[in-house]
Image (cartoon, rainbow, N blue to C red):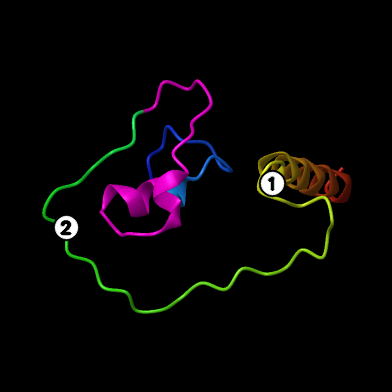
């Protein structure tokens, strides 16, 4: 149900929660950085909250809401480099 047009780190989970009308601060995170993607809105959706999410502290002074997306991409890039070095 994730929107396949929204790349990783541009809030695909937030867009899905917003699309099914789950209230929360993610409703303000609909920035798709000139990708010409419109947030979806489903009608008559029933959902049930069955758990909660705990975000882990990265223990990194550079990690904040302004540069989190960049740090995620750097993390993905670093992981791919490590995987490539193992299987070469």
Position of residue 27 measured from the top left corner of the image (x, y, whole percent): 39, 49
Between residue 50 and residue 66, name the one nearer to us.
66
Provide the residue designation for mark 2.
Answer: 45
Q: Nearer the viewer, residue 79 or 15?
A: 15
Which residues fall within the magenta stretch?
A: 15-37
Residue at x-position 26% and y-position 54% = 21
Is any part of residue 1 visible from this angle? no
Q: Residue, x 44% and y 45% (percent of image)?
A: 28
Secondary element at image label 2: loop
- Does the magenta run of residues contain 21? yes
The image shows residue 40 at horizontal and vertical percentages of: 28, 38
Is 63 situated left or right of 26 in this image? Answer: right
Q: Which residue is mark 1?
A: 68
Quadrant assignment for the C terminus: top right
Q: Earlier in the sequence, mark 1 or mark 2?
A: 2
What is the secondary structure assignment of the residue under circle 1?
A: helix
Residue at 83 percent across and 47 percent down: it is 87
> Residue lying farthest left?
44
In the shown orientation, is residue 69 left or right of residue 74? left
Q: Can the viewer see residue 81? A: yes
Question: How many marks do you count on the picture?
Answer: 2
Examine the image and state in which quarter residue 25 appears.
bottom left
Q: Residue 3: x and y, percent? A: 37, 40
Task: Work out which residue is located at the far bottom of the displayed protein and give it.
Answer: 50
Local crowd size for mark 1, using a 10 Å CA cut-off: few (<14), some (14–19), many (≥20): few
Report the residue at 50% width, 20% height from top.
34
Say the numbered circle drawn on residue 31.
none
Task: Give residue 14's position: percent from left, percent from top.
Answer: 43, 50
| The stretch drawn in magenta includes residue 55 | no
Crowding at label 2, few (<14), some or many (≥20) Cα neighbours within 10 Å? few
């Amino acid at each position: 149900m994730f929107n396949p047009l929204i790349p990783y780190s541009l809030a695909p989970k937030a867009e899905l929660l917003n699309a099914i009308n789950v209230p929360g601060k993610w409703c303000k995170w609909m920035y798709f950085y000139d990708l010409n993607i419109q947030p979806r809105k489903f009608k008559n959706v029933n959902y049930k909250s069955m758990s909660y999410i705990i975000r882990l502290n990265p223990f990194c002074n550079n990690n904040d809401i302004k540069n989190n997306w960049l740090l995620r991409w750097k993390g993905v890039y670093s992981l791919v480099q490590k995987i490539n070095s193992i299987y070469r």
